């Protein structure tokens, strides 16, 4: 099981590149030209998140360096230890369903503070990669068609989010043996 | 919501720093982090360009459409309220596949199109149908196969193996999406 997960991690990007480019070439796509055209969007996409990134990074930096983060972590520690979640990750877990860009900034700050290859860094990365923003997506999608009564959608989405968080912690504790 | 959290982080941080006597540290970290955030975005340019370039090839070769077509059959088991070969099913499949491949920008318009198609099947226009709830629960549970942004952030932060979380994230994603499907199937009996 552990070996399979590690193989998936190391093979997925090279295999993906091979399949996409190979299939494109066979289908007669001018792969180089198409690649360049798509790659142009990379610049705008990355720079569009810049102001959000600065805003979030500075805010969390102030919160952490003041000592407020330590206070918060100590307060939530009894609850998170019950769920088996490292308390340093709880702020990320809370903000994740609210905003994609804000949580991206928060993950980046966690990676900077604890190191990307630390246990906390790995769990935070896994969580971030296995959950999505909820509130914004629901309001945009339902808003676009004028649906006001969304019934149980939010509860199902939040349950799935929680499942993703817990799964991330469990899997990381098995694969990266803390 | 993010407004409130953002201002709380800053104000609480500043007040606590006065009590802890850490005003210099706070100033330093605010300046450092602003600078680091920009470096980080430069780090993202490369991997976004690589990914979006590959995705353009996948779209032009018809690969994305082809996967979405095949996926409709599997999705038919999950989305029980949609008739076979209805345009809603196609739009739902396209959105989910776009999300799987990490095409965030392309996924949103496809998702709104899917919602409009689902609304055509809806007898009560102000109330969500089970199919809509399922679509959004699956959508927000994350179905992304390769979390490129996370890999890029790890790489910029100096990870020895930025891709090592792809496998763990994939398993966790499967868990969260399965939980979404089960939650919708159970909750729809009570609403």
Image (tube, rainbow, N blue to C red):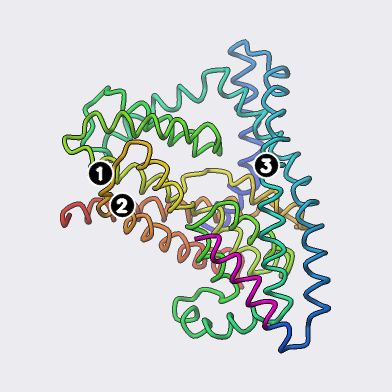
Give residue B141's position: percent from left, percent from top. Answer: 42, 51
Mark 1 chain: B
Q: How would you rate the neighbour count of disc 3 (Cα within 10 Å): few for under 14, some for 14-19, many for 20 or more?
A: few
Q: Which residues are magenta?
A: B1-15
Residue B109 vertical placement versus A76 (above, below):
above
In the image, what residue occupies the spot 82% across and 57% down? B35
Mark 3 chain: A
Secondary structure beneath dot 1 equals loop
Q: Which residue is mark 1?
A: B128
Q: Which residue is mark 3?
A: A48
Give residue B136's position: percent from left, percent from top. Answer: 36, 45
Q: Are marks 3 and 1 in contact (CB under 8 Å)?
A: no
Q: Which residue is mark 2?
A: A153
Do pointers 3 and 1 mark residues of a single chain?
no
User: Does residue B3 show up magenta in the picture?
Assistant: yes
In the image, what residue occupies the spot 58% across and 18% down? B60
Real-space Cα distance between discs 3 and 1? 32 Å
Residue A20 vertical placement versus A135 (above, below):
above
Mark 2 chain: A
Q: How would you rate the neighbour count of disc 1 (Cα within 10 Å): few for under 14, some for 14-19, many for 20 or more?
A: many
Q: How would you rate the neighbour count of disc 2 (Cα within 10 Å): few for under 14, some for 14-19, many for 20 or more?
A: many
User: Does residue A135 show up magenta in the picture?
Assistant: no
């Amino acid at each position: 099981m552990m070996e399979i997960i590690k193989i998936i991690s190391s093979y997925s990007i090279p295999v993906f590149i091979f399949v996409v480019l190979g299939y494109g070439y066979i289908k007669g796509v001018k792969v180089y030209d198409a690649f360049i055209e798509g790659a142009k969007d990379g610049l705008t996409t990355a720079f569009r998140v810049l102001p959000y990134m600065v805003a979030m990074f500075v805010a969390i930096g102030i919160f952490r360096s003041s000592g407020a983060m330590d206070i918060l972590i100590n307060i939530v520690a009894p609850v998170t230890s019950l769920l088996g979640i490292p308390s340093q990750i709880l702020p990320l877990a809370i903000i994740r369903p609210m905003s994609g860009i804000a949580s991206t900034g928060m993950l980046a700050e966690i990676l900077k503070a604890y190191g990307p290859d630390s246990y906390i860094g790995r769990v935070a990365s896994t969580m971030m990669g296995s959950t999505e923003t909820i509130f914004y997506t629901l309001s945009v999608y339902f808003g676009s068609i004028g649906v006001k009564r969304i019934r149980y959608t939010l509860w199902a989405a939040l349950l799935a989010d929680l499942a993703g968080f817990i799964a991330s912690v469990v899997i990381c504790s098995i694969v990266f043996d803390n | 919501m993010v407004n409130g959290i953002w201002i709380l982080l800053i104000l609480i941080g500043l007040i606590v720093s006065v009590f802890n006597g850490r005003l210099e540290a706070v100033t330093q970290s605010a300046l450092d982090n602003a600078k680091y955030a920009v470096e980080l975005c430069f780090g993202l340019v490369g991997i976004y360009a690589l990914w979006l370039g590959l995705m353009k090839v996948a779209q032009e070769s018809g690969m994305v459409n082809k996967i979405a077509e095949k996926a409709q059959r599997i999705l038919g088991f999950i989305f029980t309220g949609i008739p076979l070969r209805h345009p809603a099913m196609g739009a739902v499949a396209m959105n989910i596949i776009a999300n799987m491949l990490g095409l965030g920008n392309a996924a949103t318009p496809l998702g709104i199109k899917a919602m409009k198609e689902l609304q055509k099947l809806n007898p009560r226009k102000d109330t969500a149908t089970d199919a809509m709830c399922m679509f959004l629960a699956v959508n927000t549970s994350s179905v992304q196969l390769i979390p490129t942004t996370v890999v890029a952030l790890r790489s910029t932060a100096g990870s020895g193996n930025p891709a090592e979380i792809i496998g763990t994230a994939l398993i966790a994603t499967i868990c969260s999406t399965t939980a979404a499907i089960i939650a919708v199937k159970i909750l729809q009996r009570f609403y």
